[in-house]
Image (cartoon, grey):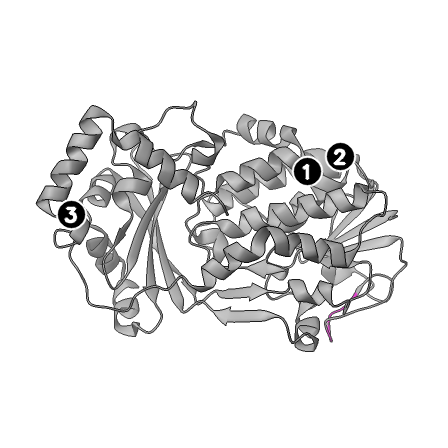
Amino acid sequence: MFKKVIILGNGYSAQLAAIALHPIIKDITIVSPKKDLVANPIDLRGQSAHSHIFLPRLQRELLNIDPEILQELSELGHKFVPGSNRLKHNVPMGCNRLFLTRWQFDLAINTIFNNRVNASCVNGKIVNMDKIDTTQTLLAMDTGRLIKVDNTTLIIDGMGTNSPCILPFMKECKDVIEEKGNVVYLTQFFQLSSSSDISSLPDPIFDCAHNFGNAHIMLYPANDLWFTVTIAINDANKPLIKKLRNSDSFYNYCKENPHIKKWLKKSKMIGPNRIYINPKNRWNVPIFQNGITPPNYIAIGDALTSMLPTLGANCSFTATHIRILRDLILSPKGLDQTIFAKQVKKEQFTFFQNALESKIQNGEFISYAQAPQNRLLKRLKKLIRKTIGLDIKRIKKHLIDTSSL
């Protein structure tokens, strides 16, 4: 059906789409502003400089797209592992998590892209958008409108929530859902000392995550002894946000959780904390159900759907978009936008609705010791369950219940 693919963007969405489609369509071009990926981009703003966790839905989708992707990630040192250090490696897939910073993950996908697509496609290299003759390709940067191209060319929009292509179609479609997240995320990078044994530190998901009433705190480990602490705050709580932009105040707030404090004592703080302001929940799927766009244009990733990033669900959603797109291209009837939209809605809309209902409180600060789950009796029961191994079943259930994204 398509002889050529032009992919807009140069992030994870665009490169994974190229990896998935290159066995089917050899003529693939990525059109993007030039972006250099570096090993430790802690000086960057935006999602790359924030904490991340990758859910087992991503693992399942990568297996569906091509099992060798997981093998290549593993060879780069990135494996899905049990989401708790209380579990062993023979747990169900739903218990697994991939713990990496976003820039570590993006760098790995970029490596796989270069090894596969740049090496084997007709036009696999990334083309700088500034050098593209827009009258010959697809994008009029002044208006954000798509220019009509040959119907044998598939245009895939992986430029994220601010894609200049998708925004005009959003204005034409009354069924699009867009809601402010009303959350501010503050993230601080840390690196453990070279002698640190992560397995001896408190469990990141089950011990370190906590609700302080006026904010949620989360700790995510990564490779090379990196880890991040992220504090999610209701954006109405301006005084707390302003206070925690100060690195010392951020550090002292984190120490209120004694489990996180143990991580901090063995690490050094790298750079200032990063702010990610009010990400949007967006559902652009109706655009393709209503046939508003050209028939050979499709959006994936944050250009199609986006949610609050706390659980890393958007990366899982993106992989699902790509798997559905790939399967439709391979089907006897080929890609149909309406069928694509229906399938995305069937698999993802329930989870998107649940994300809309997630709210960060704007209440008073509750110390760790005063939190209901940390009362002496509850802590004693928890210790007994852990000692005799009864907590394993609960841990597995919690991980699987939060894996559906």
Residue at 14% x, 43% y is 378
Could you say whether the residue bearing mark 3 is in a helix, strand or loop?
helix
Q: CA distance from mark 3 to mark 1?
A: 49 Å
- Magenta stretch: give its range: 139-143
Q: Please provide percent x and percent y for residue 109.
A: 60, 40
The reply to whether callout 2 and callout 1 are in contact (CB within 8 Å) is yes
Q: CA distance from mark 2 to mark 1?
A: 7 Å
Looking at the image, tell me whether mark 2 or mark 1 is earlier in sequence order: 1
Residue pointed to by mark 3: 374
Q: Nearer the viewer, residue 183 or 196?
A: 183
Q: Is residue 367 left or right of residue 285?
A: left
Disc on res. 158: none
Is 109 drawn above or below residue 294 in the view shown?
Answer: above
Disc on res. 114: 1
Residue 193: name its quadrant. Answer: top left
Q: Is residue 391 magenta?
A: no
Could you say whether the residue bearing mark 1 is in a helix, strand or loop?
helix
In front: mark 3 or mark 1? 3
Q: Please provide percent x and percent y for residue 97.
A: 44, 37
In front: mark 2 or mark 3? 3
Residue pointed to by mark 2: 119
Q: Amino acid at mark 3?
A: Asn
